[in-house]
Image (cartoon, rainbow, N blue to C red):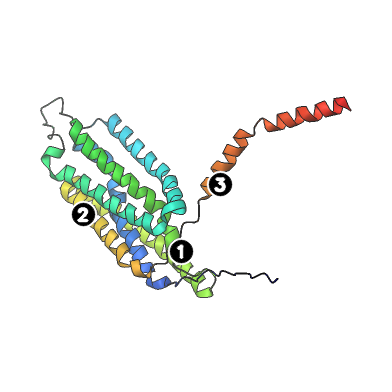
Amino acid sequence: MENNETVTTKKEPNYRGVKAMPFVIGNETFEKLGTIGTSSNLLVYLTTVFNMSSIMATNVLNIFNGTCNFGTLIGAFLSDTYLGRYTAIGIASISSFLGMLVLTLTAAIPKLHPPKCKSDDSTCEGPSGGQLTFLFGGFVLLVIGASGIRSCNLAFGADQFNPNTESGKKGTNSFFNWYYFTFTFAMTISLTVIVYVQSNLNWAIGLGIPTFLMLLSCTFFFIGTRIYVRVMPEGSPITSLVQTLVVAFKKRKLMGTIRIALSTSNIST
C-alpha cells in the first residue's frame, strides 16, 4: 500500500511594506507626542493640582512607572500567546487614549480635583477618595496602553516587510531609521512645547493636546487595518521558561533518589 503524504504549505503573507509603514510610524509618533511630555510632568501636576506632598506624588509615580515597565512583559506574553500584535496594539492605543482623556477631565472639571491652595493658608485641602479613584483609574488605563504599545509596536512594524527578500530587508532597515527619528522628534517636541503649555498656560489645555494626539494615534493605526500583515500568535518563550522551571522544581529530589539507588546497588554487588 502506498502512503499518501499530505504536504501543507504555509500561505505567504501579502507584504505591503512601505505602504503600511506610515500608519505604524504615525501611531507611534502621535502616541509618544501624547504621553512622554505628560509622564515627565506628572510630578508637577500631582503636587500643584492635586495638592499631594512631594513624597506621596513621588511614590505614586514610582509605582506607575514601575508597573508600566513590568506590564510590557505581560503585554508581550499576551500578544505572543493569545492576542497577536495587531489586537494588542489596538487595545493598548484605545486604552492610552481613554487614560489621557481621564487625566484631562481631572484638570478641566473642578469637582475632579481639590481646590487650589491659597497663598495665605499653611495647609491645603487634599484630594478626596473619589477624586483619587478617578485619577488612579486613568493611570490604570495608561499602564494598559503602555504595556501593549511598548512591547509590540516595533515588532509589528517589522512584520510588514518580507524578511526573505532584498527589498524587504532594506525596507526593515528604513523602518527602523524612521522609527527612531520620529521617536526622537516626538520626544523633543513633547518635552518642550507640551510641558511648557502644561506648566505655564493651562493644565486642561496642556493635557487636552496630548489627548487629541492619542486620538490621532488610534486613527492612524486603524486606518491601515486592511493592509497590515497580522502574524498569528504562536506562543511565548516565557511559557517554555516557566514550564522548565516548574519541571526542574518538581524533579529537584530526583537526582538524590537516583544517587541513593546507585549506591545501594553498588553495595549489594
Q: Which quarter of the rendering shows the N terminus?
A: bottom right
User: Where in the figure is residue 255, as x and y percent of width and height?
Assistant: 71, 32
**Mark 3 or 2: the one toward you:** 3
| Structural crowding at the residue carrying mark 3, measured as other residues with C-alpha within 10 Å and reported as few (<14), some (14–19) or many (≥20) | few
Q: Is residue 32 visible?
A: no
**Mark 1 or 3: the one toward you:** 3
Between 93 and 166, the one lying in front of the other is 93
Under mark 3, the amino acid is Ser
Q: Secondary structure at mark 3?
A: helix
Q: Give the distance between the C-alpha atoms of the residues marked 1 and 3, in whole angstroms.
A: 24 Å
Q: Secondary structure at mark 1?
A: helix
Specify the quadrant of the image occupied by residue 133. Answer: top left
Between 116 and 140, the one lying in front of the other is 140
Between 168 and 86, the one lying in front of the other is 86
Specify the quadrant of the image occupied by residue 246. Answer: top right
Q: Is residue 215 above or below residue 264?
A: below
User: Circle 3 is placed at which residue position?
Assistant: 240
Under mark 2, the amino acid is Ile
User: Circle 2 is placed at which residue position?
Assistant: 209
